[in-house]
Amino acid sequence: MSGLLVAGTTSDAGKSVVTTGLCRAFARRGVKVAPYKAQNMSNNSMVVSTSSTTGVEDGTTAEIGRAQWVQALAARVTPEPAMNPVLLKPGSDRRSHVVLMGHPAGEVSSHDWEAGRRHLATAAHAAYDDLASRFEVIVAEGAGSPAEINLRAGDYVNMGLARHAGLPTVVVGDIDRGGVFAAMYGTLALLEPEDQALIRGFVVNKFRGDAGLLKPGLDSLESLTQRRVFGVLPWEPSLWLDSEDALDLEGRRAAAGATRKVAVVRLPRISNFTDVDALGLEPDLDVVFASSPADVADADLVVLPGTRSTISDLAWLRSRGLDVAILEHVRRGRPLLGICGGFQMLGGVIADPHGIEQSGVEGSVAEVEGLGLLDVRTDFVPAKNLRLPTGSALGVEASGYEIHHGRITRGDGVEEFLGGARVGNVFGTMWHGSLEGDALRGAFLAATLGREPSDVSFPAARERRLDLIGDLVEEHLDVDALLDLAREAGEGAVR
């Protein structure tokens, strides 16, 4: 089996970017390549059809991390559950909901972190082996850092995966944070000899400055570690599209000249925040993330995004006085959009009698009142709804995806809107990703802000971004050497 592990000195070092870029670069060479991440921890996920692997068009769906979905697009293959077999969705600081091969599979907590994940390791490695049997090359993305030696015994995402499949490993470091040479050298030094043997080199990410000043450091790193540097990726500020987590939400800010402000409430457990990426591409919209009443006071449009913990985040909203600011925004006749959990907050009763979202959360409650802007009731049930719905709204065709335990009930006579509800300028939808449709986005902005549709194409913009990442990797990394490295995989596999 052929493959390569892209590890990193830290979270957000650039593993996702390098993995995405290599998938596009290898695909350009005619290689049948697939992305893979054994375990992703993110509330930003995507629904995929399973028909590509089952061969049965029965509408069956599954859930994977958004990053692996995008990487599959970069590889020009159909996204599937095996590309992200384990997805952990944080519900609190110490407990995460587990999605295994695309479907809910209980929880894992900090006190049983190692023992509670042993069965996940078996499933993750089986998914890798399955992919490797069907694709020429697997580009696997690690998680966090491989030098988290306190977690090494139960690791199946970084060097545990590398040992399982004999994967040569490249370590990515973010030079913009500083200390990149120490981080790279230290990562290698902390590993046990068997793991060190699989580390084949390094990639420097987010470099801006004089390359001549960097070269002595690269030469010293290669001399000290006896491993090569495969290249240096430059700083590129426009790579935020379809990002995996909320570490860089400010990347949505528009260029100078934007005349309308879109305030997206930055909920503590925000999920699927890529719903607003398409708004960020509109030239006259400035998308900002708001955490105080002052942040929304002058907004032309307010968005309440999805959340993994609707009741807890609603309590946070009220504690900050954001509920009052949102109600005042609506009273002044300005538009409001709620998406999934954000939509549920706009309704009446929100009930979670089974503790679906709040399992293990201190001070959890079974039922609360929403903001009362829409005549809608939400009841959380154990079965998760995963759908790829299509339909129409505002006179145009629309599509999206649904990921939720909440079941909504509209009051009599309430206007339906994309699986949700609408009253005047207050819109609520259960469909994530609907604004990525150019026609729907144009119609929505016309209805809410009175503006004419622009010529922005979100699908075209995403493809340009994937090509940009591919171009950067082609220009600045030794892609042929990395492909040769991937084809050497398997020699150090531990079975």
Image (tube, rainbow, N blue to C red):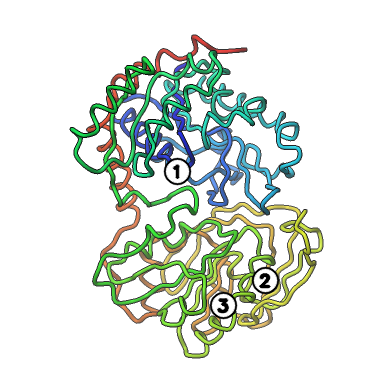
Left or right of 488 in this view: 416: right
Left or right of 414 in this view: 469: left
Whole-Å distance between the Cαs marked 1 and 2?
A: 29 Å
- Residue receiving disc 2: 315
| Tags 1 and 3 touching, CB below 8 Å | no
Whole-Å distance between the Cαs marked 1 and 3?
A: 30 Å
Answer with mark 2 or mark 3, whichever residue precedes in sequence: 2
Q: Residue at x 58, y 67 (%)?
A: 419
Q: Secondary structure under badge 3?
A: helix
Horizontal and vertical percent for residue 474? 25, 31
The crowding category of the residue bearing disc 2, from other C-alpha atoms within 10 Å (few below 14, some 14 to 19, many at least 20), is few
The crowding category of the residue bearing disc 1, from other C-alpha atoms within 10 Å (few below 14, some 14 to 19, many at least 20), is some
Whole-Å distance between the Cαs marked 2 and 3?
A: 10 Å
- Residue receiving disc 1: 12
- The type of residue carrying mark 2 is Ala
Q: Residue at x 33, y 30 (%)?
A: 27
- Residue receiving disc 3: 322
| Residue sitting nearer the eye, 252 or 405 | 252
Left or right of 5 in this view: 468: left
| Residue sitting nearer the eye, 441 or 25 | 25
